[in-house]
Amino acid sequence: QVQLVESGGGLVQPEGSLRLSCAASGSIFVINTMAWYRQAPGKQRELVASIARGGSTNYAESVKGRFTISRDNAKNTVYLQMNSLKPEDTAVYYCKIFTVAREVWGQGTLVTVSS
């Protein structure tokens, strides 16, 4: 069984920064893509950023230039550095991993951007 543990969410003022982490543990062989999604109140869950095992990345247009996704394959961990945060970034952020056998979601961490 694979488990994901997320951390780093919280309350931040506009233009502030946060760093989210998501560590995978359990019966993991190889993690291919790792990704962050978010879901704001009353909205559908959306992809924020993804990173392939080799390091290639993909970002939602709304976060390009402000967010950076990275990973540490030795630690089975993915990070999301979020800078210049805006109130519209407020959401529950979920990590997701893709392996050969399955896709696994984290439990979510709340990010609130407010003055």
Image: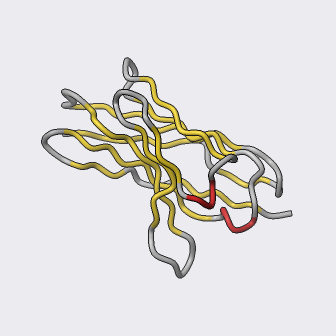
Q: In which quarter of the image is residue 14?
A: bottom right
**Residue at the top extreme, as displayed:** 74
When the figure is inspected, residue 80 is found, relative to residue 61, above or below; the finding is: above
Q: In this view, does 11 lie to the left or right of 41?
A: right
Q: Residue at x 46, y 40 (%)?
A: 57
Q: Which residue is drawn at 46% across and 50% down?
A: 36
- For the rendered model, the colour scheme is secondary structure
Q: Position of residue 63 (x, y in %)?
A: 63, 54
Q: Position of residue 41 (x, y in %)?
A: 56, 76
When the figure is inspected, residue 53 is found, relative to residue 16, above or below; the finding is: above
In what quadrant of the picture does the N terminus appear? top left
Q: Is residue 66 left or right of residue 84?
A: left
**Residue at the right extreme, as displayed:** 115
When the figure is inspected, residue 115 is found, relative to residue 23, above or below; the finding is: below
Q: In this view, does 54 lie to the left or right of 101?
A: right
In what quadrant of the picture does the C terminus appear? bottom right
**Residue at the left extreme, as displayed:** 101
Q: Residue at x 19, y 31 (%)?
A: 27
Q: Where is residue 108 in the image (x, y as percent from the top left)?
A: 47, 55
